[in-house]
Amino acid sequence: MNVFFDVDYTLIADDGSLRPHVHEVFQKIKDDGHDIYIWSGVGIRWEVVNRHNLRQYIETCYLKPLSDYKETLIELGVDVMPDFVIDDHSGVPLAFGGVVVRPYYTRNETDEELLRVYDELKNFEKA
Ligand SMILES: [Mg+2]
């Protein structure tokens, strides 16, 4: 499956710090045979990917549609279909399937939301 992650408040907090369990969960998703993509409504976020050493896990970065999600994929250059989408806003997961995460606004070492995402992905695979 093509697994798409939002950036702001999904993977990073407002201070740019990485949400707990990103490396571990990305590795598990890859080990399960999926392709990981990162997209954002405010730009192509290679800087975030490189700063947090995430390049090894992901296929590429894209711009994320902010409305008419499916219709605007092509014009944004997204040439694979998202199968499972993780975002702190519900619009994109509702359009493609996936999971809405609790927004990660501030650094919190005890946050386990991404472990739940991995469980939801496993359940989605089985369904
Ligand atoms: Mg976000």
Image: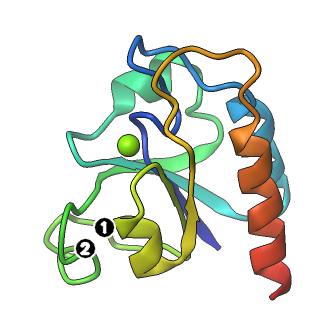
Image spot of residue 119 (x, y percent): 83, 59
- Residue 122 lies, in percent from the top left, at 83, 68
SS label for mark 1: loop
Can residue 30 be spotted in the picture? Answer: no
Q: Are marks 2 and 1 in contact (CB under 8 Å)?
A: yes
Mark 2–mark 1 Cα distance, whole angstroms, equals 5 Å
Asked whether residue 118 is in view, the answer is yes
User: Looking at the rendered structure, which numbered label has been put on residue 58?
Assistant: none
Q: Which mark is residue 73?
A: 2
Measured as percent of width and height from the top left, residue 11 is found at 53, 34
According to the image, what is the colour scheme of the structure? rainbow
Is 86 left, or right, of 16 in this rendering? right
Q: Is residue 39 left or right of residue 110?
A: left
Tell me if 78 is positioned left or right of 28 in this view.
Answer: left
- Give above or below for 65 relative to 80: above
Q: Earlier in the sequence, mark 2 or mark 1?
A: 2
Give the quarter of the figure containing the C terminus. bottom right
Identify which residue is drawn at 77% across, 51% down: 116
Q: Residues within 10 Å of mark 2 (few under 14, many from 20)?
A: some
Pointer 1: what residue?
Answer: 78
Name the residue at 59% across, 21% down. Answer: 53
Residue name at image x 61 percent, y 26 percent: 19
Relative vertical location of residue 24 with respect to residue 41 in this rendering, above or below? above
| Residue most extreme to the left | 75
Residue at disc 2, secondary structure: loop
Residue sitting nearer the eye, 11 or 56: 11
The amino acid on which the numbered mark 2 sits, given as a three-letter code, is Leu
Instruction: Quarter of the image for the N terminus: give it.
Output: bottom right
Residue positioned 53% across, 77% down in the render:
97
Quarter of the view holding residue 47: top left
